[in-house]
């Protein structure tokens, strides 16, 4: 063999070795395990309670700790907290949070939920979290009475909606409380021009209605390249709107509800804000979309639990079964398959660790497939736990909420009727 041939052979062998090394380096690491003591305890409690169906579980101890941590922050800042009803749509859950926070302030997002909550919290200060069509304002007045409708702070975002509400109020013979939505950087609507806001406030007063305050929502702040600058810009926009109100004759801050914040930003407001009313809802149960640094001290307090219906030790690919072994070799986390009761929720598998949605089967709301490695040894009737991404998008999907407290399912909390 010539020197050239030997060099070519060595080079090709080296390339093959490097290619094999690169392939093995890119190979997914083997993951997985079984439930830790925390989730094993919840699973055992669910089985003792006979809850072998998809169910939403709330850890009452974690919920209580989150309430205490949030209250410590807002109390230290002297900021009254408004509980967001849509994020906690269960009368008992909502009542527990309101009692723990010492708050009778609620933010409500639909006429239907407003009608449902009115008799449960007759003394509550109710602020709408989004501007509703005037027909919904009329529906609430027709159902709960004009006096109740006049007590609610209705959110108004444009001069057109303002005129619609004022016309409806004249027809009803009531003087509603109107809170103006302002754009502090989210760009989801609301007044942006201080002069237009001042004119709207004067028109409200001259029409016999009440200007109750401002609402500036700022969840974009922690997602910006510079959250500090985004918060400062939001505060500047809020101050300009407040100055416009003062110029229109509404200078008494104590008489106004100056609402802002939300779960992602309330801690920034605790460090300094022009607002005098901050809203929090989802942070009390901390689903996955709320893993912000400012909420690191809060613990996930809500999970979906659902039983395994079928389990496979060698999950085959339909139609291309011959490729299954190669797939399992390449990604050992696809070896086992677990078909669960239900599925396709806005949630991610959290226990046992290492479970993931099947990339080949896709998502399914019936017997969704989760895959995992041989380290996961679930059997039919064992539980899988998922952590919701959100709360309001999920809490009304499962019926009564299972309350895990003291190692047992201590209560079942009914949810509010379904509403958008």
Image (cartoon, rainbow, N blue to C red):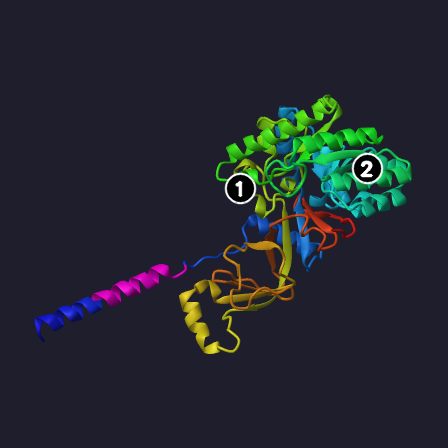
Alpha-carbon span between mark 2 and mark 1:
35 Å
Q: Quadrant of the N terminus?
A: bottom left
Q: Residue at x 71, y 34 (%)?
A: 82
Look at the picture and state if 400 lies above or below 210: below
Span highlighted in magenta in the image: 14-28
Nearer to us in this view, 274 or 183: 183
**Residue 320 falls within the magenta-colored stretch:** no
- Mark 1, other Cα within 10 Å: few <14 / some 14–19 / many ≥20: few
**Which residue appears at 72% of the width and 50% of the height?**
401
Instruction: Please indicate, yes or no, whether residue 390 appears anywhere in the rendered image.
Output: yes
Numbered circle sitting on residue 121: 2
Residue 399 is drawn in which quadrant? bottom right
Q: Picture coordinates of residue 79 (x, y %)?
A: 66, 27
Chain-order first, disc 2 or disc 1: 2
Q: Residue 24: within the magenta? A: yes
Q: Is residue 331 above or below residue 280?
A: below
Tag 1 residue = 223
Q: Is disc 2 surrounded by few (<14), some (14 to 19) or many (20+) residues within 10 Å?
A: some
Q: Mark 2 falls on what kind of element?
A: loop
């Amino acid at each position: 063999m010539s020197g050239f041939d030997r060099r070519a052979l060595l080079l090709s062998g080296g390339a093959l070795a490097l290619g094999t090394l690169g392939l093995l380096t890119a190979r997914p690491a083997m993951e997985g395990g079984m439930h830790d003591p925390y989730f094993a305890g919840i699973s055992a409690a669910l089985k003792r309670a006979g809850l072998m169906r998809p169910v939403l579980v709330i850890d009452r101890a974690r919920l209580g700790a989150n309430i205490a941590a949030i209250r410590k922050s807002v109390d230290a800042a002297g900021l009254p907290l408004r509980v967001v009803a849509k994020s906690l749509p269960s009368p008992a859950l909502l009542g527990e949070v309101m009692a723990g926070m010492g708050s009778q302030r609620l933010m409500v997002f639909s006429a239907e939920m407003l009608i449902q909550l009115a008799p449960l919290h007759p003394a509550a200060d109710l602020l709408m979290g989004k501007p509703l069509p005037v027909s919904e304002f009329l529906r609430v007045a027709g159902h709960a009475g004009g006096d109740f409708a006049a007590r609610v702070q209705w959110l108004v975002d444009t001069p057109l909606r303002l005129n619609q509400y004022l016309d409806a109020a004249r027809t009803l013979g009531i003087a509603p409380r109107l809170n103006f939505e302002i754009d502090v950087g989210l760009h989801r609507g609301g007044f942006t021009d201080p002069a237009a806001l001042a004119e709207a406030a004067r028109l409200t007063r001259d029409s016999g209605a009440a200007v109750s305050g401002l609402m500036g929502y700022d969840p974009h702040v922690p997602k910006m390249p510079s959250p500090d600058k985004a918060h400062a810009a939001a505060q500047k926009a809020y101050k300009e709107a407040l100055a416009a109100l003062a110029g229109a004759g509404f200078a008494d801050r104590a008489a106004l509800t100056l609402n802002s914040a939300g779960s992602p930003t309330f801690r920034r407001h605790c460090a300094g804000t022009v607002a005098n009313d901050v809203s929090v809802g989802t942070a009390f149960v901390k689903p996955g979309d709320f893993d912000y640094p400012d909420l690191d001290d809060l613990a996930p307090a809500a999970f979906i639990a659902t039983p395994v219906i079928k389990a496979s030790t060698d999950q085959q690919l339909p139609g291309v079964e011959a490729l299954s072994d190669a797939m399992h070799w390449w990604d050992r986390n696809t070896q086992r398959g677990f078909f669960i009761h239900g599925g396709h929720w806005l949630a991610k598998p959290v226990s046992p660790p290492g479970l993931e949605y099947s990339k080949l089967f896709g998502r399914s709301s019936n017997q969704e497939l989760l895959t995992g490695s041989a380290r996961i040894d679930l059997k039919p009737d064992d539980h899988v736990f998922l952590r919701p991404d959100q709360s309001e998008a999920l809490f009304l999907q499962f019926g009564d909420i299972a309350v895990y407290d003291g190692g047992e399912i201590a209560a079942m909390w009914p949810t509010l009727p379904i509403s958008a």
